[in-house]
Image: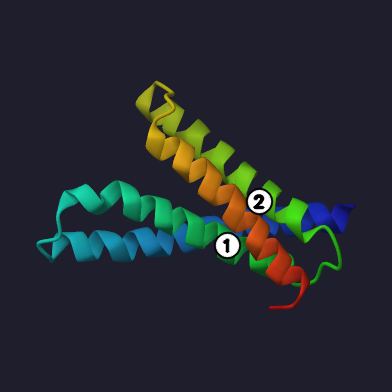
Amino acid sequence: MSMSLFNIAKGVVVSFLVTLILLFVFSIVLTYSNISENIIAPTIIVITAISIFVGSTIANLKMNKNGLMNGALIGGIYLIIIYIISSIINQEFSLTINSIIMIIASIICGMFGGVLGINKV
């Protein structure tokens, strides 16, 4: 059980690291290009999904079962942390269509990454 918790924590940390790297690259692209700001919200959803997928896959490489559940947990924990930080910074919490899409995409990508990780990619 403790190995599973360690791997879930590792998956969340890896997801955050991938998010930071991809957001940094995206910010550079936005700064030095004429890309419309309308793509920011969809790009953040994609970056979040990719990050959770990568974190979930890596976290489940040494696991032998429960990839679906572990991946969903990684996605869920990641989102809870993001929404807590966001609520503290913005002093409010609201669910928008983008939030709902991000929640669904994150959990599905976490589950898919978990299954791939269990099956050793």
Residue 54 located left or right of residue 98: right
Q: Mark 1: give few (<14), some (14-19) or many (20+) Cα within 10 Å.
A: many
> Can you tell which mark lies on residue 74?
2
Q: Quadrant of residue 28?
A: bottom left
Please, which residue is most extreme toward the right here?
1
Residue 70 pos. (x, y %): 75, 54
Q: Nearer the viewer, residue 108 or 50?
A: 108
Residue 92 pos. (x, y %): 40, 21
Residue 94 pos. (x, y %): 42, 24
Residue 71 pos. (x, y %): 69, 55
Residue 23 visible? The answer is yes
Identify the secondary structure beneath mark 1: helix
**x 33%, y 51%: residue:** 42
Label 2 is placed on what type of residue? Ile
Residue 50 located left or right of residue 57: left
> Can you tell which mark lies on residue 53?
1
Quarter of the image with the C terminus in it: bottom right
Q: Nearer the viewer, residue 94 or 22?
A: 94
Mark 2 to mark 1 CA distance (whole Å): 9 Å
Q: Earlier in the sequence, mark 2 or mark 1?
A: 1
Residue 17 visible? The answer is no
Label 1 is placed on what type of residue? Phe
Q: Mark 2: give few (<14), some (14-19) or many (20+) Cα within 10 Å.
A: many
**x 42%, y 58%: residue:** 47
Please, which residue is most extreme toward the left here?
34
